[in-house]
Image (cartoon, rainbow, N blue to C red):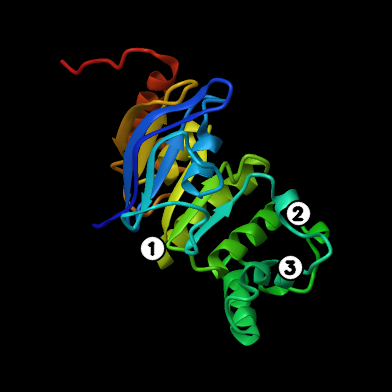
C-alpha cells in the first residue's frame, strides 16, 4: 500500500502543550482509529490534519505534500450532527451543499441521491433534519461526506451522541461503506471497544499532551459482527491491551 497521510513530530501548544511530537502514517485504503483519554488532544489532532489549525511544530503530509489550509480531497464528519446540518435545507440539499460550485447541478443531485441510498436514506431526501432521529441525522452527515468523494475521511467521535443500538448500526454502516469504496478513514473515539471493532489499526494516545503510546494492528477478519466479533478471544485480548495502555497497567508477558 502507498502512504496517504504522514505526521512527522507534530506538536501544538495553546496555553499548554496539547500534542507532543506525534509521528505516524496511514496507508491508502486503511481505516485507522485513534483512542485516548478525554481531553488529550484528539480533536486538536484532527483539526491539524484537516488544515483547520496550523500546528506549532512538525508537519502533516497528504499525498506527500504539506497540508496548508483545508485540502480539496478531504472531508470531516463531526460528533455534533445537529450543528453540522442546516435545519432550513432538506436532507438532499444538505448533502449537496459542499458540492456547490464544484460540480454541475445534475451531478450534484446524482451524487447526493447515491450517497443517501448508500446510507439507507433514499426515502428521506425531501425531509428536513429536525424530522429525523439523531441516528438518521448522523447518516445524513456521513452521506454528505461520501457525496464529496474524499480520498481521506476524518471522523471526530461521530457516534458518541447516539444511543447504543444506533451506534452499533452506524459502526456497521461505516464498515460496509469502507469495504465498498475503500476510502481511507481516520476515526477518533474515546470508546475502546469501538476502536478495536472498526479499526485496521488502533493508535493509542497518552493523556495531554498527546503522545503515541502504541500502534496496534487489529488481527480480526475483515467481516465483523457486533456479537460474534466482540465475543472472540482476539477482540477481548486487543481491547484489554488498549485498556491497559490507557490506564497505565502493565501488559502481562506470555510465559
Residue at (41%, 38%) from the top-left corner? Answer: 196
Residue at (66%, 73%) from the top-left corner? Answer: 122
Residue at (66%, 72%) from the top-left corner? Answer: 96
Whether residues under marks 1 and 2 lie with C-beta atoms below 8 angstroms apart, the answer is no
Q: Residue 242 occupies which quadrant of the picture?
A: top left
Q: Which residue is mark 1?
A: 182
Q: Which residue is mark 2?
A: 133
User: Is residue 235 at all visible to an observer of this figure?
Assistant: no
Report x, y in % for residue 212.
Answer: 36, 28
- Total residue callouts: 3
Q: Is residue 233 above or below residue 97?
A: above
Check the image and name the residue furthest to the left. Answer: 255
Q: Is residue 219 left or right of residue 76?
A: left
Of the numbered discs 1 and 3, the one sitting upstream in the chain is 3
| Alpha carbons under labels 1 and 2: distance apart | 28 Å
Classed neighbour count for the residue bearing mark 3: other residues with Cα under 10 Å, few (<14), some (14–19), many (≥20): many
| Alpha carbons under labels 1 and 3: distance apart | 25 Å
| Towards the viewer: 72 or 231 | 72
Q: Which residue is mark 3?
A: 91
Of the numbered discs 1 and 2, the one sitting upstream in the chain is 2
Report x, y in % for residue 95.
Answer: 66, 68
Classed neighbour count for the residue bearing mark 1: other residues with Cα under 10 Å, few (<14), some (14–19), many (≥20): some
SS at circle 1: loop
| Towards the viewer: 59 or 47 | 59
| Towards the viewer: 243 or 41 | 41
User: Is residue 231 at all visible to an observer of this figure?
Assistant: yes
SS at circle 2: loop
SS at circle 3: helix
Amino acid at each position: 500500500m502507498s502512504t496517504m497521510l504522514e505526521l512527522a513530530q507534530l506538536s501544538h501548544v495553546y496555553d499548554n502543550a496539547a500534542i507532543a511530537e506525534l509521528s505516524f502514517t496511514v496507508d491508502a485504503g486503511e481505516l485507522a482509529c485513534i483512542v485516548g483519554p478525554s481531553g488529550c488532544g484528539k480533536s486538536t489532532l484532527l483539526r491539524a490534519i484537516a488544515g483547520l489549525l496550523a500546528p506549532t511544530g512538525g508537519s502533516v503530509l497528504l499525498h506527500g505534500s504539506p497540508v496548508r489550509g483545508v485540502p480539496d480531497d478531504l472531508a470531516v464528519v463531526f460528533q455534533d450532527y445537529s450543528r453540522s446540518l442546516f435545519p432550513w435545507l432538506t436532507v438532499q440539499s444538505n448533502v449537496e451543499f459542499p458540492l456547490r460550485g464544484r460540480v454541475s447541478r445534475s451531478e450534484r443531485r446524482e451524487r447526493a441521491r447515491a450517497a443517501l441510498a448508500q446510507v439507507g436514506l433514499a426515502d428521506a431526501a425531501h425531509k428536513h433534519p429536525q424530522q429525523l432521529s439523531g441516528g438518521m441525522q448522523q447518516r445524513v452527515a456521513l452521506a454528505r461526506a461520501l457525496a464529496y468523494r474524499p480520498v481521506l475521511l476524518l471522523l471526530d467521535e461521530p457516534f458518541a451522541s447516539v444511543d447504543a443500538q444506533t451506534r452499533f448500526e452506524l459502526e456497521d454502516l461505516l464498515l460496509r461503506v469502507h469495504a465498498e469504496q475503500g476510502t481511507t478513514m481516520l476515526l477518533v473515539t474515546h470508546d475502546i471497544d469501538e476502536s478495536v471493532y472498526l479499526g485496521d489499526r488502533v493508535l493509542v494516545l497518552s493523556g495531554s499532551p498527546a503522545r503515541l503510546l502504541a500502534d496496534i494492528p487489529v488481527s480480526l477478519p475483515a467481516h465483523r459482527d457486533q456479537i460474534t466479533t466482540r465475543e472472540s478471544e482476539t477482540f477481548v485480548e486487543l481491547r484489554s491491551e488498549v485498556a491497559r495502555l490507557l490506564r497505565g497497567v502493565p501488559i502481562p508477558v506470555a510465559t
